[in-house]
Image (tube, rainbow, N blue to C red):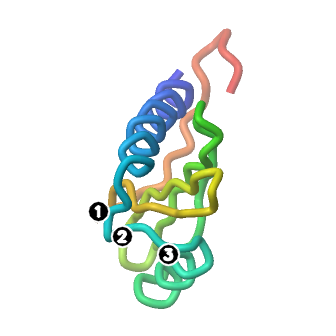
Amino acid sequence: MQKILFALSLGFLGVILAHSAAHSQPASCAQRPQVVERLETKYGETRRSVGLASNSGIVEVFASERSGSWTIIITLPNGMTCLVAAGESYEAISDAAPDGEKA
């Protein structure tokens, strides 16, 4: 259930942010290879999860287990990648699905 709620939250967030990014290009957007390279080299973050937003944007979570930093990005159909959120204290959780639910 938590996985489903998390996925829905990312989807809604992606739609909202993609809508905002479509109307004005914030300074926190660039081509995906540039964004990924910066996350890897400056912050030591690697991709941890990925999902498809309802607007066909790709939402990804990058994180570093070493430093605990994390970043959520969305790549729009036009190829532009935008920062959604970033923070600290990343922790991977692998909860078992409650009885009767699929993981």
Count residues near mark 1 (Cα–Cα under 10 Å), then give few for <14, some for 14-19, many for 20+.
Answer: few
Q: Earlier in the sequence, mark 1 or mark 3?
A: 3
Q: Residue at x 34, y 54 (%)?
A: 24
Compared with 93, 70 (above or below) is: below
Say if mark 2 contacts mark 1, CB within 8 Å. Answer: yes
Q: Residue at x 58, y 37 (%)?
A: 53
| Quarter location, residue 70 | bottom left
Camera-side residue of 76 and 1: 76
The spot of residue 94 in percent (x, y) is 56, 43
The residue that mark 2 highlights is 69
The spot of residue 80 in percent (x, y) is 55, 63
As measured in the structure, the alpha-carbon distance from the residue carrying label 3 to the one carrying label 2 is 7 Å
Q: Secondary structure at mark 3?
A: loop
Say if mark 3 contacts mark 2, CB within 8 Å. Answer: yes
Residue type, numbered disc 2: Ser
The residue that mark 1 highlights is 87
The spot of residue 79 in percent (x, y) is 63, 62
